[in-house]
């Protein structure tokens, strides 16, 4: 693969993989989940439109704002809020594993929304393995936090985020080839801020007394965890195949588990490893089935797409 494709994969993997770690660190700075999401969305939106201004791009059309409203609510606003609420009750590493369920769930949505991506035996096996992995995490009560975790609630919130974001991802895939990267990302993030900032003010009030470390974490989540990964992801959707664009799904849990253990002292137990292995096996089966379906009988999709 080209160096720029690998760079985009790394940006998505590190940005999204460390966002949960930064969120848990922000909780230790007495920041609430709604404040985190409201400020994160506001700063990420400002970054996108500042970048548009530097590139002298015109204001998005009314059609793009309408498209951005649908994709933005399902591909960014709702899942980001659900994941942030979920990581209150589980470790960043376990959240990363739960988020890795996106490809199998996407396969289900694609079956109903995309005429050329039906469910097949491989995808059903992949989905079943992923569900089994989630079941292990629920049944064993593993949260990765030692004390204070609520894994069942975390799983419900995170999986709701996965289901919504998978729908948004399929919808975005249908439209991404026809639009510029900034035209896709800008309205999504802006409409996310329109929803999340008033929600922040209603639930947690105007943020005051945020420490320097707290602002640093918010800036990191907004820029490295939102702005850059979304641009990189939409750039990949336009230039490479679905298999290549999904590579962060394999790598993100590794970053989240490793970073959470090293930076926050989160636990990685054998049962978390078992649940994670089943989930990642489900992702592999799903992507393998996707690759064979895209390539046709007796062929495989090339590494370039």
Image (cartoon, grey):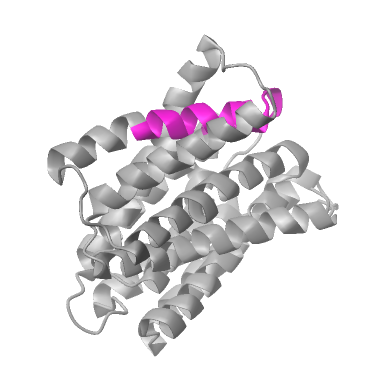
Residue 17 location in percent, x, y?
A: 51, 64
Q: Is residue 174 magenta?
A: yes
Residue at the spot 73% in from the left edge and 57% down from the top edge: 7
Q: Is there any visible trace of residue 168 in the rendered image? A: no
Q: Position of residue 130 (x, y in %)?
A: 45, 63
Which of the two residues, 70 or 108, is positioned nearer the viewer here?
A: 70
Q: Please tell me which residue is depicted at 29% across the width and 62% down the height of the picture.
A: 211
Q: Nearer the viewer, residue 162 or 222?
A: 222
- Toward the bottom, the furthest residue is 270
Residue drawn at the location 15% of the way across and 46% of the way down: 204
- Relative depth, front residue between 259 and 27: 27
- How many numbered dots are placed on residues in this image? 0
Within the image, what quadrant is residue 275 found in?
Answer: bottom left
- Residue at 66% x, 61% y: name it: 10
Q: In the image, is 230 to the left or to the right of 89? A: right
Q: Is residue 60 left or right of residue 236?
A: left
């Amino acid at each position: 693969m080209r160096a720029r494709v690998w760079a985009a994969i790394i940006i998505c993997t590190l940005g999204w993989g460390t966002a949960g770690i930064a969120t848990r660190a922000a909780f230790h700075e007495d920041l609430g989940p709604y404040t985190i999401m409201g400020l994160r969305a506001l700063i990420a939106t400002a970054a996108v439109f500042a970048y548009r201004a530097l590139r002298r791009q015109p204001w998005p059309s009314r059609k793009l704002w309408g498209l951005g409203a649908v994709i933005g609510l399902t591909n960014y606003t709702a899942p980001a809020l659900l994941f942030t609420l979920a990581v209150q009750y589980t470790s960043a590493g376990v959240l990363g594993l739960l988020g890795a369920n996106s490809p199998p769930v996407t396969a289900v949505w694609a079956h109903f929304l995309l005429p050329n991506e039906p469910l097949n035996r491989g995808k059903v096996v992949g989905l079943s393995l992923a569900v089994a992995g989630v079941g292990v995490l629920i049944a064993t009560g593993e949260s990765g936090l030692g004390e204070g975790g609520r894994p069942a609630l975390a799983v419900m919130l995170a999986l709701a985020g996965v289901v919504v974001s998978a729908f948004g991802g399929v919808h975005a895939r249908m439209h991404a080839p026809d639009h510029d990267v900034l035209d896709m990302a800008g309205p999504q993030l802006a409409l996310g801020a329109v929803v999340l900032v008033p929600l922040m003010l209603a639930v947690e009030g105007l943020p005051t007394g945020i420490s320097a470390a707290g602002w640093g974490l918010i800036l990191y989540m907004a820029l490295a965890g939102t702005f850059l990964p979304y641009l990189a992801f939409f750039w990949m959707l336009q230039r490479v195949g679905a298999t290549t664009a999904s590579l962060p799904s394999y790598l993100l849990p590794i970053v989240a588990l490793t970073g959470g253990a090293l930076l926050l002292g989160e636990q990685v137990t054998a049962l978390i490893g078992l649940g994670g292995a089943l989930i990642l096996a489900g992702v592999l089966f799903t992507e393998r089935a996707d690759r064979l379906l895209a390539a046709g009988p007796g062929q495989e999709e090339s590494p370039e797409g």
